[in-house]
Structures are given as C-alpha cells and as structure tokens.
Amino acid sequence: MTSQMSPYSLTIIKPEQDRIRFQGKGAGAGMMMMGSMGAMGIAIGVAIDEGISKDIQTSAEKEQVYIPDIVEQSLKRTLERIQGEVIQERFHSPLTLQLKIIRYGFKSAPGDQKDPVSIELQAEIISEDGAVFPLNYPFQGETVMTEELEEIKENGKLIGSIWEQSLSQLFTTKQTEFIEYLSGIQPNT
C-alpha cells in the first residue's frame, strides 16, 4: 500500500489574543458618550464590546467551536479542491504555506435582522518565498452573511455554522485570485 504525500504543508500562526473579538455596539455608544463624559465614554463603549465578546466566546466554548480550526479546515478544503489545477502541476515537493490569523470575531453589519452581525476575519496566507495573499472578511463587493447578535451570543453551533458558510463564500469568491497567487509562487527546487 503506498501513501500519497500531501502536496502542501500548512502551518497556522494564531493571533496574540487568541479569542473571539466583537466590534459594534460599544463603539457607537462610546462615541455618543464621549461628548458628555470625555474619555470615560469611550472606555465604557470598549467595555460593552468586550462584554459581548466574552458572551460569544463562552457560547462557542460550550459547543467546542474554535474559529481558527474552522479557518484552517476551510483553507485545507480549498487547497484540496484546487490542488490539481495548480499545486501538483507546479511543485515537485510540498508547497509550504503559513496561515497567519491576525484577528477573528464578529462585527455589526447592515441587515434585516435585529442587531445583525457578520463574521470578521483578518488573516494572511504566506508562501515560503514571502508572497502574501490577504484573507479578509467582510470583503469588498459581496453581500455578507448575517445573524442576530442575541442568537450568536446564545448559540455556539450557530457561531460555527455562520463561520463555515461565510468562509465558503469567501474562498469560492476569491478562488480565481487564490489560484493566481499560488501560480505566482516560485517553486522550491
């Protein structure tokens, strides 16, 4: 029985603050309170968002939802889907990539629901020759998937689901650009 060598090697670099972040309600409240309370108003706004972040994190942990794992699995599925188109044709030894997750969480978003939120991802895919592919959500030109904030705060499974769906949308939309990025990487000899 022969085992096939993987056409790529993927290393994950997690953010320094490896936790779900939230950006939204508190920022707006802080700006409004700044007029009457000064810097204290902004501090209160930050505290509101931090409290929401903790609620979402707790909900995710209860269901064993870990967002960096979801991002990693989504990237691996994409690499497996396109490997014949680019990776195996260009690289004689495994392609080495790093997935650097800078920030992840949720942010307020426009939408029809009460307090709609979307995922927020700031990440980079870095090749061994230093080429960088930005991986950000939300991204320009696409309608983002949203859920109600209260549902996200209380339902860890929904957190995983919206992340999986949003990343599928991201990788599907960016697939052509990603293939171009991979095609531009200098093969290691």
Image: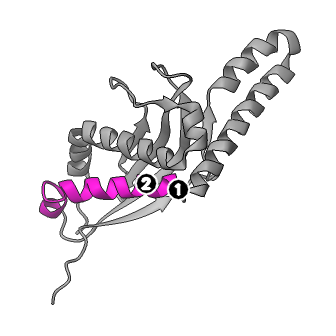
Residue 167 image-quadrant placement? top left
The C terminus appears in which quarter of the rendering?
bottom left
x, y (%) of residue 114?
54, 22
Q: Is residue 71 above or below residue 122?
A: below
Q: Which amino acid lies under the numbered mark 1 shown in the image of this protein?
A: Tyr
Rounded to the nearest whole Å, what is the CA distance between mark 1 and mark 2? 7 Å
- List x then y, in percent, for residue 161: 42, 46
User: Which residue matches tag 1?
Assistant: 66
Query: In which quarter of the view is residue 37 placed?
Result: top right
Whether residues under marks 1 and 2 lie with C-beta atoms below 8 angstroms apart, the answer is yes
**Residue 82 located within the stretch drawn in magenta:** yes
The answer to whether residue 58 shows anywhere in this view is yes
Give the magenta-colored segment's residue range.
65-90
Depicted 29 relative to depicted 187: above or below: above
- In front of the other: 124 or 150: 150
14 over 8 or under it: above or below? above
Scheme of colours in the image: one colour
* Residue for badge 2: 70
Percent x, y of residue 29: 72, 19
Where is residue 17 shown, x and y percent of the image?
65, 50
Q: Residue at x 57, y 51 (%)?
A: 60
**Towards the viewer: 139 or 7:** 139
